[in-house]
Amino acid sequence: MKKINVESKSTNKKMRIIMFGHKRIPSRSGGIETVLTELCPKLVLNGFEITVLNRAGEKIKHGDYQPVRHNFKGVKVKNVPSIRLKGLSAVISSFFAAFIAAFGPYDLVHIHAEGPSVMIWLPHLMRKKCIVTVHGLDWKRDKWHHGFGAHYIHFGEKMLSKYADAIIVLNKDTQKYFKKTYSRNTFYIPNGVKKSDQIEPSIITKKFGLFGDDYFLTVSRLTPEKGILPLIESFRGVDTNKKLVIVGDGSDTDEYVKKIIKLSQSDSRIIFTGFVGGRLLSELYSNAFVYIIPSFVEGMPMSLLEALSFGNAVAASNIPEITEVVGRDHALLFSPKDQNQMKNVINRFLHDTRLRRAMKQSSKNYVADKYSWNIVAHETSKVYLQVLFKGE
């Protein structure tokens, strides 16, 4: 891959990039956090000076990365004030982050997600170059369908469409949406994934009584658009001794989490692990019988890329954001609205050993060849330079 010259043409200094819109890095607490934890250090290796603005006071989940004070693999880390109130944490932290970005010594502001993009007007007003990565159309998510949150997300989308010097999207469906709705061209840069080595079961045996190939696995936030409720209802109708392991926790969705846990109480095969990371998560990916992703809405699901990188066979909903990743040969698909289809796909994997083995053998090389963090960093760097040096 050809090396990119990222120094300022006028000063020969490293170009200074500041990012906000995430909760904190390093972290695996969400898709954006996982992406930036992998991407930012590679942008540093590409020659940029990267500063990230973490939300102060974020609760650290057991098994997640521990906080860093000032530096993460060459990435400068700063905290911005926030308020731990439902719906306001992101708004408050984004305002302070935008203020720092606007008045700080930065060449380019990189905002992540539509909600935080409401504040793009401030760095734009101070004549900062601004890029936004749209990790998904957030207004599609159940918790943003109504009220202030829905209006706020839509306003952020309009603001970024008006003021961003460049927009990065993770899937082609979103790319088409911005072209049709706002006549905006966008840069399509899908996420990457690390190569993963399979790990023999150890912790999962002690903690959950799992031995390998004896459970279906899904990893996601426990929110309605992720399709966990219909997955549970479908699985309860499947005649198998295998378990269903559900990894993740809620995101301001306490009532929904209580609902799905209550639904599962009568079926001892269903296991909720909560949020997990590190070796425990790697063991769960490594030893799953089949990975299931039943989402109604996605951006570009990191958990799907990770499952494929561990060599999993996949059952997946047939939404465009997922079919774009798995192609024609790397998953069995179902409509997330059709529980019978989901149940039929689960049963097919239970009875077609040859199909499952073929998928497992092909999936690992497929993602390793197609989705690389080095490529993501390279393409992102090219967008930075195109914006920074436009007209020079």
Image (tube, rainbow, N blue to C red):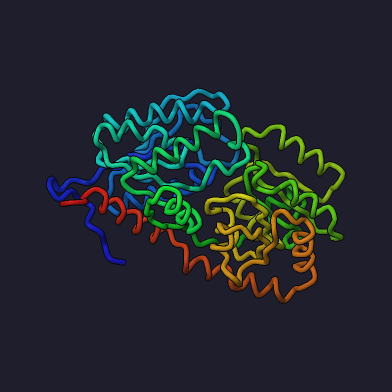
Residue drawn 34% across the image and 33% down it = 121
Q: Quadrant of residue 197?
A: bottom right
Residue drawn 49% across the image and 45% down it = 32
Q: Does residue 50 appear left or right of residue 305 in this picture? A: left
Q: Does residue 360 appear left or right of residue 344 in this picture? A: left
Residue 253 picture location, percent across and down: 66, 34
Q: Which is nearer the eye, 142 or 273?
A: 142
Q: Is residue 25 visible?
A: no
Q: Quadrant of residue 308?
A: bottom right
Residue drawn 81% across the image and 44% down it = 264
Tell me the quadrant of the picture where the N terminus can be found: bottom left
Q: Is residue 82 visible?
A: yes
Question: Looking at the image, which residue sits at the far left?
Answer: 10
Residue 320 picture location, percent across and down: 57, 59
Residue 71 picture location, percent across and down: 36, 39
Q: Which is nearer the eye, 161 or 92?
A: 161
Q: Does residue 159 appear left or right of residue 339 in this picture? A: left
Q: How many marks?
A: 0
Looking at the image, is 184 positioned above or below residue 274? below
Residue drawn 32% across the image and 30% down it = 122
Looking at the image, is 71 positioned above or below residue 292? above
Looking at the image, is 242 positioned above or below residue 94? below
